[in-house]
Amino acid sequence: MPEASSAGNHGSALPLREMVEDFLYQEAALLDAWRLDEWLALFTADGRYLVPTTDLPDGDPQKDLVFIDDDMVRLRARVERLKSRHGHREYPSSRTRRFISNIRIKVEGGSIVVTSSFLVYRFRMGESSPYVGWYEHRLKRVDGELKIHNRKAVLDLEALREHGAVSIIV
Amino acid sequence: MFNPKNLIIDNPKDGVFRVHRSAMTSLEVVQMEQERIFNKCWLYLCHESEVENPGDYRRRNVAGRPLFFIRGSDGKLRVFLNTCTHRGALICRHDQGHADILQCFYHAWSFNNQGDLVGVPDEAGYSDSFNRAEMGLKSPPRVDSYRGFIFVSFNPQVEDLVTYLAGAREYLDLIVDQAEKGMRIIPGSNRYSIKANWKLLVENSLDGYHVRPTHKTYFEYVNSLGINTSGVQSAFSRPALVLGNGHAVEEHDGIRGRPIARWSPLFGEENKDEIAAIRARLVRKFGEQKARHMADISRNLLVYPNLLIIDSIDITVRIFWPLAPDLMDVTAWQLAPREEKPELLARRLDNFLTFHGPGGFATPDDVEAIESCQAGYKAEGVEWSELSRGMHREAIAEDELQLRAFWRQWFGHMSGLGKVETNDPVIRERAALAR
């Protein structure tokens, strides 16, 4: 995978790989800390968050059943729900810890397409359930900052056996 | 000694209905359910649309048994026990696929897609008494379908499927008739487990009483999209309906809209005309009264013991199997008319995601609720769960009559009484008077 260096007027002198890695680690840290409003601010105004079902990882939400297909209206509502004491599956909130690796970066037109492997541990009520899979982040530069235009989390799990739900942001 | 007769208190005189919590926690109960319910009843396997073309197959467990279904080269859908007739290995090892010939990998016996044994390496190694014709793949004792829904039974003596479905048949018709060219299962399924007894999901799926308190965040979201849900309370004031044989339906006013055919902002301006056209077609075909029932009212239908069809802002088909007293596997699909326009299908799927499914704004809270009940049973000091709501009156959807209907039939099977009356006596008496 070629490493493009960062270019343009965004003020960062970091090579693209370092920028992208920092971005993903920062995103993971915000989610693990339940700083969900700050996490929302990482998205472009037309951002999307998609989680396909375990049996159809290429699922197209227009014609197939998926687990999650949020535009920013629903993603904001999801965050409000996660912060609410009426979001029962996450109240009390679970503890999570995210590991991201195998990061590959490709520049496609105006987008930086980043694929990575993830392992998200979730602990709650005496139980642990790991979500394992891969991300595709489509990032854009907005006013010199990286923003998420499209975030897809594809699960390698055969089913949500220990999990019962996708109640956290995977 | 465990006795199923001690698990339910059904006292209509005082309006008391209780279920002993050991019905949800005991391993003996799970074993007895397998023998007296899952080995005796008709059980949902699949929808015919899941294997459209000759050779298409899918595998699925039913009551713990590995099965697969395949459309033969002759166009016929068959169901087989997923085990080689030679030494037992699984024949079908992909969740889904396409095959003209299925070959067991162990000794390479081959079966065609109609189940016939067509290849045995070194067949000369067997005596003359070896008869290929008898060694084809085996089917469950009974397989039948009703309007595209395929059921199996492991009980050779089970009554015919239509008789078994009793009053649920009319409601399956009400759902299937919404489509002009038949229904199909949409690709992609929800597969998840819940750490709770399977009967708690039966209760939850038919329970109008929990909807407002449990799903507050869902209604907040829907309200924020401009849907007025202030009528949600009166929406659940329709009479609850018991359909015989343990089947039941909880119907409510479809105030959030329905793809067929009641427009609301959840379906977008782009679908307003299409939904109106569908509604007009239903009125032409079925008359105003039936069309209104089909198109304006939403329903959660239980086909006893464990098939749920939720015909609402989408149509969810949900099946679940006990693995242990406190663990079940759930699978859910979306059912839609074959002819549905892409824009309307997209909205239907979007609505599904909002409420249903493991990533929705409501299903995870149902999972949490019933897991919480299961966890609470460990306290032990409270022996009975209370399911008396509405027993003293003509029960409405927010009452617990539908749950009692399920439990009464469950009790009938478990205690050896067989088929029993499942309605509340107050309704039975009224019906008798009306006659």
Image (spheres, coloured by chain):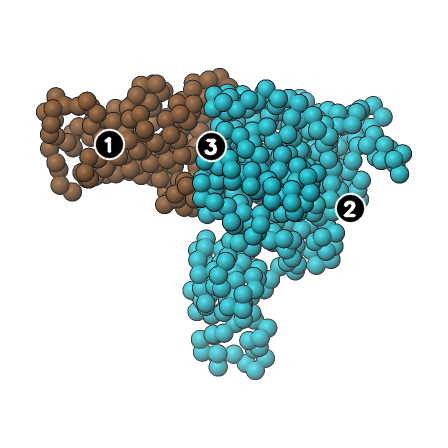
Chain colours: A brown, B cyan
Label 3, secondary structure: give it. helix
Q: What residue is shown with label 2?
A: B418
Task: Mark 3 or mark 2: name the one nearer the start of the chain.
Answer: 3
Residues marked 3 and 1, same chain: no
Numbered disc 2: what chain? B
Viewer-closest of B330 and B49: B49
Amino acid marked by disc 2: Gly
The picture quadrant where one finds residue A54 is top left
**Dot 1: few (<14), some (14–19), or many (≥20) neighbours within 10 Å?**
many
Distance of label 3 from label 1 (alpha carbons):
31 Å
* Residue A128 at x, y percent in the picture: 43, 30
Q: Do dots 3 and 2 share one subunit?
A: yes
Spatial CA span between label 3 and label 2: 51 Å
Q: Inspect the image, locate mark 1, and give the three-letter code of the amino acid beneath it.
A: Leu
- For the question of whether residue B177 can be seen, the reply is yes
Q: Pointer 1: what residue?
A: A139
Q: Secondary structure at mark 1?
A: strand
Chain of the residue under the numbered disc 3 shown in the image:
B
Secondary structure of the residue carrying tag 2 is loop
Q: Quadrant of the N terminus of chain B?
A: top right
Dot 3, crowdedness within 10 Å: few (<14), some or many (≥20)? few
Q: Looking at the image, which residue is at 48% across and 78% down?
A: B123
Up-down: is B67 above or below B110? above
Using the image, tell me which numbered label, if any, was put on residue B269: 3
- Residue B151 position within the rendered picture, expressed as x and y whole percent measured from the top left: 63, 53
* Chain assignment, label 1: A
Marks 3,1: beta carbons within 8 A: no
